[in-house]
Amino acid sequence: MATDNKKEREREELHRAIWAIADELRGALDGWDFKNCVLGTMFYRYISENLTEYINKGEHKAGNTDFDYAAMPDEDAETAREGLVQEKGFFILPSELFANVTIRAKDDENLNGTLGKVFRNI
């Protein structure tokens, strides 16, 4: 019984700590705007990883085991745009994948503009 109480207190403490961090990150944004940013970012990451996995699986199945869509030049990926939009319903250039944008984010002085361009292109 004491173990259950201890676990519950630890869970509550963790919840408070996570909430405090989220509140600090949110800064001047109101809760609704912050939620939209977080959910949008999560969705962007999900569809980027989903597309990469889908393409990589197909290439690996075809015997191209070293293939990595995220490392592919955008110009080469463009040739598959139409087919991928028909199959998946969306297309993201390799340079605009979540993983690649986050790698460059710290050096991108116009990250909001970059993300805006990515979202317009999806």
Image (spheres, helix red, strand yellow):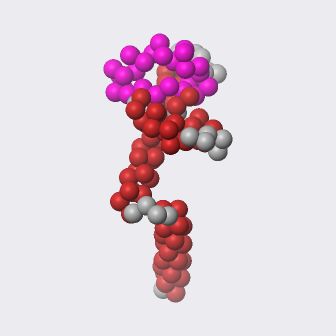
> Which residue is pictured at 50% across the width and 43% down the height?
112
In magenta, the rendered stretch is: 68-94
Nearer to the camera, 77 or 27: 27
Residue 101: x and y in percent read 57, 37
Extreme residue in the bottom direction: 2
- Looking at the picture, does residue 13 appear above or below residue 32? below
Which quarter shows the C terminus? top left
Q: Can residue 87 be seen in this view?
A: yes
- Looking at the picture, does residue 12 appear above or below residue 115? below
- Looking at the picture, does residue 4 appear above or below residue 38? below
> Which residue is pictured at 45% across the width and 38% down the height?
116
Nearer to the camera, 89 or 100: 100
Nearer to the camera, 119 or 78: 119
- Looking at the picture, does residue 83 appear above or below residue 20? above
Position of residue 59 in the picture relative to residue 65 (left or right): left
Residue 88: x and y in percent read 37, 26
Position of residue 104 in the picture relative to residue 116 (left or right): right
* Secondary structure that dominates the magenta span: helix
